[in-house]
Image (cartoon, rainbow, N blue to C red):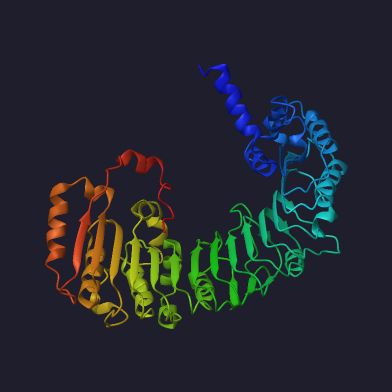
Amino acid sequence: MEAPWLQRRSCCRINDLPDNLIHHILSFLPIKDVIRTSYISKRWRYLWTSVPSLDFDGLVFDPQMKFVKFVDSILSHRSNSAIEKFCLRFGSDYCRLPHVHTWVLTAVRNNVRELSIAFHTEQSFQLPSCMFTCRTLQVLSLNLYNSVLKLIPPINLPVLKTLRLSSVRFRDDNLTQLLSNCPLLENLHLEACVISAHIIVFSHSLQRLTIDGSPKQFLLDHSGVKNGIRVFAPRLLSFTYRNHHAQCIHLEDVSSVVQASISLEFDWDVKHIVCGQRVSNSLEGLLNVKVLTLSSATVVLLSAASGLLGRLPAFPKLVQLYVSIVVGKDHFRALTCFVHNSPNLEFLSVNIPHRQVLYYRNLWQRWFDKECFKPENAPYECTFRQLKTVKINGFIGDEDELAFVKYLLKRASVLEKMIIVFSNQLSANLELQMKTRDNILLYPRASSSSEIICQSVPVIGTQEMVENPYSNFLLF
């Protein structure tokens, strides 16, 4: 146990710290613990009243009415110092709308810079209008748990740079209206939002855009433009698009994007040619992308509409390609198209999620035959003049995979290294590993200095594969 004089010396050291540093330390503590620090010494008695970060979580209060009294008490004792961050989480049973309006108004009056609100309600709940006219707000995060976002003009967020919307339902053009009044917006993140109208993302300042799907339980109208998304963002650098319904998106002006990730899911109620066209639409406009990530479902959807492969856009600046594919000739053919259309590609990472193959095999049989991928049937006979590194993860050693490896080795004239990571199944069979590796080492190579590295992974029991078919569902 620490001696009393050591405790006093440690306390004195903390007391010697400047207020701004103490406030920073307190920002990592729950608000109840922050208040308890008032008992440390006289100097600490009122420090908590000027802490710039306030985080109120109503879901940990019982009974519920204590939450309202607690928040009211904290804000009433607060000094007039600025509020850097204000977080509020609660349910509709925890407080009434007037309470929320008062709390948010207090934050706005104290020049709040970061505001985060998450609430769960089964009834309509209108957010305070003052939060949409705050002239100091730089970060706004809303989680509405599938409630409708209602906006009442005027809307003006002149310095907002980051907007995160989670589980928000949009009607009419509310999202378009909100975005058009954020002239300095740099980061936009939409997660599990439901869009029932045509959305236009128009911003000259936007640099990072993430659209992370809509909830699978919501069936959207797929009639073209009605619930589509159009993006006009000439300064966009990073674009991530994940969608459970392969929803239509058009990238009108995103020529500055250097990093993109596309992951579209199946919609079995829509013809595969339509889904494939949506994938193609999402890729158009990414002409200057340098790093591209594609999910296995995205490749499958594009492969299903084989007529689109010959019309894939070129990616003249693409340097790194990360892709997940399932085993099948059409999927490797689609991958070959991407590599061919990327003349400056240097790094290729291929992930083969075999658990996903097992789970969806019956569904995909109606779209693809079982013919093996053959180099002579590849869409292009070409030499990959810049490809230096290839990594294949989940390699099981079947005909399609071996044919694809042979195809790359024969045409990658400057290849330096090919890393093949065996799947769990192949890693469990040492004899088959050696046979597979020896066969690959005999393949002809366009690059005499290329190195082939075969690696095994710790074996995962087959029981887990049966019980958890989703555990390796979307790997990039």
Can I make out residue 68 in this image? yes
Which percent across, then down, holds residue 247?
58, 66
Instruction: Compare residues 332 and 329 and report the one nearer the observer.
Output: 332
Check the image and report above or below for 83 versus 208. Answer: above
Check the image and report above or below for 272 versus 141. Answer: below
Instruction: Compare residues 167 and 318 and report the one nearer the observer.
Output: 318
Instruction: Classify residue 416 as left or right of residue 237.
Output: left
Name the residue located 68 percent from the left edge and 44 percent from the top edge.
20
Name the residue located 39 percent from the left edge and 64 percent from the top edge.
323
Name the residue located 61 percent from the left edge and 57 percent from the top edge.
214
Which percent across, then down, holds residue 90?
73, 39
Quarter holding residue 197: bottom right
Check the image and report above or below for 330 versus 285. Answer: above
Instruction: Compare residues 273 and 228 and report the one nearer the observer.
Output: 228
Instruction: Classify residue 82 as left or right of residue 254.
Output: right
Which percent across, then down, holds residue 265?
50, 61
Which percent across, then down, holds residue 258?
49, 72
Quarter holding residue 346: bottom left
Check the image and report above or below for 281 versus 41. Answer: below
* Figure quadrant of the C terminus: bottom left
Quarter holding residue 444: bottom left
Q: How many marks?
A: 0
Instruction: Classify residue 250 as left or right of residue 403.
Output: right
Instruction: Compare residues 403 and 80 and report the one nearer the observer.
Output: 80
Instruction: Classify residue 237 as left or right of residue 459.
Output: right
